[in-house]
Image (cartoon, rainbow, N blue to C red):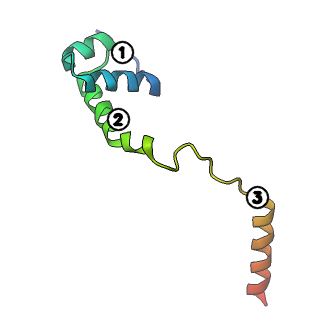
Amino acid sequence: MPRRPRRNHTPGFKAKVAIAAIKGDRTLAELAEQFDVHPNQITTWKAQLEGGAADVFDAGNGAKPPAVDVKSLHAKIGELTLENDS
């Protein structure tokens, strides 16, 4: 029997499987058969979802970090280099 090629699952698919596991209306074996993944993988995704669920409600979530002005940073580095050399 040939080995199955390695598969990469999308984050959306992983979330769907993990949410189905959290619901608990089907067994792990049933979910593994339905989604064609190993039961251990479902358990891992479920644990990751439960561990990261609090981040969804973080106050800073969704806010983009401020844009970095590379030119001004390079200018500041140049100034500090000149000060150190003096």
| Label 1–label 2 contact, CB within 8 A | no
- Above or below residue 48? Residue 80 is below
Left or right of residue 71: residue 49 = left
In the rendered structure, the answer to whether residue 32 lies left or right of residue 14 reads left
Please name the amino acid that badge 2 sits on: Leu
Write down the residue under mark 2: 49
**What residue sits 79% from the left and 90% below the top?**
86
Q: CA distance from mark 1 to mark 2?
A: 26 Å
Q: Position of residue 48 (x, y in %)?
A: 33, 37
Q: Earlier in the sequence, mark 1 or mark 2?
A: 1
Q: Tell which of 3 and 49 is nearer to you.
A: 49
SS under mark 2: helix
Say which residue appears at 76% left-offset and 58% top-offset: 69
Secondary structure category for the residue under label 3: loop
Q: Using the image, tell me which numbered label, if any, was put on residue 50.
A: none
Q: Viewer-nearest of labels 1 and 2?
A: 2
**Label ID, residue 69:** 3
Cβ atoms under marks 3 and 1 closer than 8 Å: no
User: Of helix, strand and loop, which one carries label 1?
Assistant: loop
Q: Residue at x 34, y 21 (%)?
A: 17
Q: Residues within 10 Å of mark 2 (few under 14, many from 20)?
A: some
Which numbered circle lies on residue 4? 1
Q: Earlier in the sequence, mark 3 or mark 1?
A: 1
Which x, y percent locates residue 62?
A: 56, 42
Cα separation between marks 3 and 1: 47 Å
Q: Amino acid at mark 1?
A: Arg
Mark 3 is on which residue type?
A: Asp
N-term mark: 3 or 2: 2
Q: Which quadrant would the N terminus be assigned to in this image?
A: top left
Q: At x 21% / y 22%, what residue is drawn?
A: 24
